[in-house]
Image (cartoon, grey):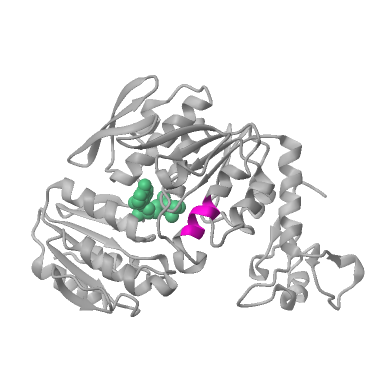
C-alpha cells in the first residue's frame, strides 16, 4: 500500500485520490456513502459489506476498523519509533503537547486534537506520521479494552498514566472499570517498557513486575513541591531524583496541570534528554484547558473544553489560590450515566468555595446541583452576560466550565464581546 494515500472516513471530506473507509457508526453507516465517495474522486473504497460498485474500486475486508488499526500498526513497525503513550482522566492533551514540544518538532510526532480513539489514532498515523523517531500518543478510553487495542497498534515503550477519576464513568460502567481500562496502558506496553504513573495507591497496588516511576503532588519520585501565582505567571518547585528544580512559568497552570508537568519532566529524564527549561517555562496555555487571561482587568478563565468532577476541583482550588473574588459560570458534566445526579450533587459542594455561581442550564443534567452560592440560572448566554455585568468588579476572576457538548464557549464569547 502506498504511503502517501489519504484515508478518509467522512465522505464529505473525500478529495480526489483519497481512500474512503466505510465505518459502521452508531449514527450512520459509511457504506451508504461509497458511491458519493467515488463520485468525489476516491481511488477506491474499503468496505466490510457487499456494495454495488465496480470490483476494481472496492477493497472488501472483514472489519474496516481492524483494517485501519492493522495498517497503522504495519506503518509503525516499518519505522520503529520510540512510542510514548499517555492516558488518564484529565490532562492528556496538555501533557502530550508539552512532551511533544520538549522532545522537539521534527524529532517527534503526536496525534493531533481528538484523534485518540481506535479510529482517530490509526487515521493520524496513516495520514500524518512521517517517520519521526519519537511519537507521543494520547490514548482515550470509553470502555475497558479500548486502551489495550490502541497499545496493540502502538506498543508504548514508555507509558504515562495520569490521574484516574470519574470522567466518562457513565460510559465505562463504574470507577473500577475506569481503573482497569486505563491500567491497560501498562499491561499492554512493550515488555521492557517503563511506566510513569500518578502516585495513587489504587493504581500502584495493581502494578507489578514493571519498571515504574511515580509522580504526584507532594508524593512520588517526581513531585510538585509548591506553587504560587504572581500576576499571570506561576512559580513552581519540583523535587526530582536529580535535585530540586524551580520554574517561572509564563502562564497560569492549575494544580492538576502542574502535577502532570512532573510526569513530563520524568519523561525527559527517562529519555536521557536535556530539559529545555525555556520551552517549558514559555509553553502557552491551551485554549479551553484552563487558559487564564485578562479581560478588562478581570481574570477570565477559559476552561470550556471539558469538565469532570476532578477537573472542577483543581479549577476551584486554583481559583482560591489566585486570591481574588471568584465566580464560575458552570454547565453539566456529561457521560455520567447512572451517576449523573450524584456527580452534580457533589459538584454543588465543590462550588461552595466560590463567591458566586451562575448556572448555564442549556440541558437539564445540571438540575440536581444545589449550591448555596448559586446566584443565577439561565439557558441564555445574553442573560448570563447581563447578570455578570451587574455583579462583577474589575479585579474579580470568572471561570467558564462545562462538558464539551454544553458548548460553554458560546457563553464565553458573548461575555467577551461585552464592551461595557
Ligand atoms: P484531556 O485530553 O485528558 O481531556 P486536557 O489537557 O484537555 O485533558 O484538559 C482537560 C481538563 O482537565 C482541563 O480543565 C484541565 O485543567 C484539567 N486537568 C488537567 N490535569 C488535571 C489533573 N491532574 N487533575 C484534574 N484535572 C486536570
Residue visible at 39% across and 41% down? 260
**For residue 181: magenta?**
yes
Residue visible at 37% across and 26% down? 277
**x and y percent of residue 216 in the render?**
36, 38
Quarter of the figure that contains the C terminus = bottom left
Residue range of the region highlighted in magenta in the rendering: 176-182
Residue nearest the observer in this picture, 170 or 290: 170
**x and y percent of residue 158 in the render?**
56, 35
Q: Is residue 351 visible?
A: yes
**x and y percent of residue 21 in the render?**
73, 64
Is 66 positioned to the left or the right of 184 in the image? right
Is 194 positioned to the left or the right of 43 in the image? left
Name which quarter of the figure residue 346 lies in: bottom left
The majority secondary structure of the magenta stretch comes to: helix
Residue visible at 44% across and 73% down? 337
Residue nearest the observer in this picture, 154 or 161: 161
Is 315 positioned to the left or the right of 136 in the image? left
Residue nearest the observer in this picture, 89 or 138: 89
**Image vertical order of residue 191 relative to residue 168, above or below:** above
Q: Is residue 417 visible?
A: no
Amino acid at each position: 500500500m502506498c504511503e502517501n494515500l489519504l484515508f478518509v472516513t467522512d465522505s464529505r471530506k473525500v478529495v480526489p485520490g483519497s481512500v474512503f473507509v466505510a465505518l459502521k457508526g452508531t449514527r450512520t453507516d459509511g457504506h451508504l456513502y461509497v458511491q458519493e465517495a467515488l463520485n468525489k474522486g476516491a481511488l477506491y473504497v474499503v468496505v466490510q459489506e457487499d456494495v454495488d460498485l465496480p470490483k476494481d474500486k472496492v477493497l472488501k475486508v472483514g472489519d474496516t476498523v481492524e483494517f485501519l488499526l492493522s495498517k497503522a500498526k504495519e506503518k509503525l513497525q516499518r519505522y520503529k519509533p520510540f512510542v510514548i503513550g499517555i492516558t488518564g482522566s484529565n490532562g492528556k492533551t496538555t501533557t502530550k503537547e508539552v512532551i511533544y514540544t520538549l522532545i522537539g518538532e521534527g524529532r517527534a510526532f503526536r496525534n493531533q486534537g481528538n484523534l485518540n480513539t481506535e479510529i482517530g489514532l490509526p487515521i493520524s498515523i496513516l495520514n500524518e506520521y512521517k517517520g519521526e523517531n519519537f511519537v507521543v500518543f494520547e490514548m482515550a478510553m470509553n470502555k475497558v479494552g479500548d486502551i489495550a487495542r490502541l497499545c496493540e497498534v502502538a506498543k508504548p515503550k514508555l507509558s504515562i498514566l495520569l490521574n484516574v477519576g470519574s470522567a466518562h464513568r457513565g460510559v465505562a460502567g463504574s470507577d473500577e472499570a475506569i481503573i482497569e481500562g486505563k491500567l491497560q496502558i501498562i499491561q499492554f506496553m512493550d515488555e521492557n517498557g517503563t511506566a510513569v504513573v500518578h502516585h495513587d495507591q489504587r493504581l500502584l497496588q495493581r502494578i507489578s513486575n514493571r519498571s515504574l516511576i511515580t509522580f504526584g503532588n507532594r508524593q512520588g519520585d517526581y513531585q510538585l513541591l509548591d506553587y504560587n501565582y504572581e500576576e499571570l505567571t506561576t512559580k513552581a518547585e519540583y523535587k526530582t531524583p536529580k535535585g530540586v528544580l524551580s520554574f517561572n512559568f509564563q502562564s497560569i497552570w492549575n494544580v492538576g496541570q502542574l502535577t502532570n508537568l512532573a510526569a513530563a519532566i520524568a519523561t525527559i529524564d527517562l529519555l536521557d534528554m536535556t530539559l529545555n527549561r525555556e520551552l517549558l517555562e514559555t509553553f502557552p496555555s491551551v485554549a479551553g484547558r484552563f487558559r487564564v487571561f485578562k479581560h478588562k482587568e478581570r481574570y477570565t478563565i477559559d476552561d470550556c473544553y471539558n469538565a469532570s468532577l476532578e477537573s472542577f476541583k483543581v479549577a476551584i482550588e486554583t481559583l482560591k489560590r489566585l486570591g481574588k473574588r471568584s465566580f464560575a459560570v458552570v454547565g453539566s458534566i456529561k457521560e455520567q450515566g447512572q451517576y449523573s445526579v450524584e456527580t452534580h450533587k457533589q459538584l454543588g459542594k465543590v462550588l461552595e468555595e466560590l463567591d458566586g455561581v451562575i448556572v448555564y442550564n442549556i440541558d437539564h443534567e445540571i438540575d440536581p446541583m444545589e449550591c448555596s452560592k448559586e446566584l443565577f440560572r439561565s439557558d441564555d448566554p445574553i442573560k448570563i452576560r447581563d447578570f455578570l455585568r451587574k455583579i462583577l468588579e474589575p479585579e474579580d476572576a470568572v471561570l467558564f466550565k462545562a462538558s464539551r457538548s454544553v458548548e460553554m464557549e458560546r457563553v464565553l464569547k458573548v461575555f467577551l464581546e461585552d464592551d461595557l
